[in-house]
Amino acid sequence: MSAQSASANGPKHKACDVCRKRKIRCSGDEPCYQCQQGGSLCGYTSSHGRLVELERKLKRYQKRLGSMEAAWKRFCPDIDLTLALHSVETESHGTSPVEPNELTTQAKSRAPTDAPSDNWATLSAVDLDVVKADSLEWDESSGLAFPADGIGSLSLDHKGTGYMGPQSGNALLRTLQASSILLRTTDTHPSQPSLEPQIPEQMIQSPAFCNQCLDYYFKYYNTAYPVLHEAYFRAQYSGVLPKPKDGSWPILLNTVLALGAHSSEISTQNADLHFCCEALQHLSAKTLQRGSLPLVQALTLLANYLQKRNKPNSGFTLLGVAMNIAQGIGLHREFSESSISPFTMEIRRRVWWTIFVFDAGSRLTFGRPTLNLAGVNTRVPGNLNNQDLSIDLDKLPAAKDVPTVASSLIWQIKLAQISNITNEKLLQSRLPDLSAINELEERVLLWQKNLPPYMQAAFSEPGFEVFTAPRMILLWRSMHLRIVMYRPFLLDVIQRRDPIDLSNSYAGYSRCLGAARECIISIVGFWNNTTTHHGSLVWYAFYWLVTATFVPVTCLLYDPQHWEGPEWRQLIEMAQGVIDNFGALETTALRAAHIINDIMGKLPERIVCRYQSSFNKTRRSSAY
């Protein structure tokens, strides 16, 4: 039957079977009015009649739905209807029912769609969307606009990002998505500025510009990671000393220039991309069939650079290659002075332990299994400046009691050892033993207590300003580690639909919040009280600040009406302002700012902070 004939003949088919047989007017309901009055069995055998009845029901239900929504807004203004419906829907998937009062001011209203699992042998709530192994395959071979990011915290879609483990920052974002449909429209891939060099290629290739980038590298990067000896490298660069003949020099030089440009005040000019392309063009299979210290240095630096430029899997791969070549030439072993010069041995120590620090950081960031140090006996580098080392040294001088290029690395090594143990504990169980994590935090706090005065935040002796950023980055790294080690307990609260009871200061989630608050206040305070802003500082500060900010964001999203909600919002807004500023030097910060702004825009209107004055007082006293 055509649509036109159906429409034309519609009226005589609207009646139910009984009314049509009796040839009387039918109300079209089910049961219709006539059948109700007469007690007859009402039915519609005509297909068109059933369709008309369904249309009438749909209109009636739509009207009823509109009335219910209006009534809900009038009589239940404090309960989010969308979340209430979502919590009811989860019951059909086997999760425990939610009581009505859990949808008001209790944290239980913000719950995930899946119950927590006691063992990672069973898929967790976060891992449920990773059901195909091939979805974890990645391709970072062209450009720099990827779904992955160097801090492992800004991607909701696992496709193309590589494996991000259950304790990575991405897991937190995916848990937020699973716990509230408010996040299902969050865009984690906003448009970003052009990633093309903003200055002419001819200028980038000029000796003057290259020399400037070289200066930036040794001023901003090598002060934290002394992979290179400055005088030795500059002598090779100028031709005073011979360059390596194994094909590693073009890779090493261009990577150094790329890191220098990216670590400086001119990072947004994207000149580093030119040098990166040059370095990658010289990276060949033939080169990787050789083993030398310069090649290890080149691959180590290139791996770290690629992570910072949102090619984390490429960087992770090259770091693995660097570590294997390093072991192949024995960097992990200590040699006697009779077989190697003190100068060379000290450089080998610096390179090996830099690889170790990078490896530990990457595995914690991306939630990947930890490597152990069995068979490693290379000593930690001495606290010496490059000027204290020369090729013809017979013996290393005594360690300095002031900041040096090795100071940050020395204390990062100690922290990375704790980080590896932490990562191992986090990967062994969805929810690690709280007492074990408490012991690890105590080790971090003891590490912090044992820092020499020149590595403390308050150190301000003139003449050592160049070491300020590495020192602060080191301290923020320790706060970040404490956040990550306690983060599973916060996620467990969300998955179990438990309230965030901050009266229990010993709870894991309370300690996570405490570490996040400390980190946010420290970074924001430092940024607002210093004028030295450069790319190397910004990338790490941005990484740690985003990790810390997502903690109060999680809590506020989970329970917007919590009594501590105004303080969480205050912390978030403090961080938002600084992250926005970071965007001037680090484009990935714009992506993070977009995500946080999008989330905050979906939350209820701001509640007046009852503790504003006391909070501001705390901020001023804790600026550093």
Image (cartoon, rainbow, N blue to C red):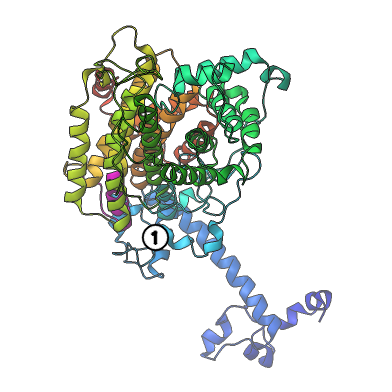
Residue 231, compared with residue 346, is above or below; it is above
Q: Residue at x 34, y 11 (%)?
A: 464
Regarding residue 562, the answer to whether it shows in the image is no
- Comparing 391 with 17, the one in front is 391
In the image, the segment drawn in magenta is 485-501
Q: Nearer the viewer, residue 28 or 89?
A: 89
Q: Which residue is mark 1?
A: 125
Q: Is residue 335 left or right of residue 35?
A: left
Q: Is residue 497 magenta?
A: yes
- Residue at horizontal 68 percent and vertical 89 percent from the top: 20
Q: Which residue lies at the image location 39% right of the left edge and 39% below the top edge?
A: 331
Which residue is at 32% across, 6% downward? 462
Q: Position of residue 226 (x, y in %)?
A: 41, 25
Pinpoint residue 497: horizontal percent, then vertical percent.
30, 56
**Residue 395 appears in the rendering:** yes
Q: Residue furthest top?
A: 462
Q: Which amino acid type is shown beneath numbered disc 1?
A: Ala
Q: Is residue 279 magenta?
A: no
- The answer to whether residue 430 is left or right of residue 85 is left
63 relative to 528, above or below: below
Q: Residues within 10 Å of mark 1 (few under 14, many from 20)?
A: many
x%, y% of residue 452?
21, 21
Secondary structure beneath dot 1 equals: loop
Q: Is residue 262 left or right of residue 96?
A: right
Q: Quadrant location of residue 443?
A: top left
Residue 86 is drawn in which quadrant?
A: bottom left
Q: How many marks?
A: 1
In this view, the residue in front, 421 or 174, is: 421
Q: Quadrant of residue 360?
A: top left
Q: If the image is split into quadrants, where does the N terminus sit?
A: bottom right
Q: Is residue 484 above or below residue 248?
A: below
User: Between residues 177 and 369, which one lies in front from this camera angle?
Assistant: 369
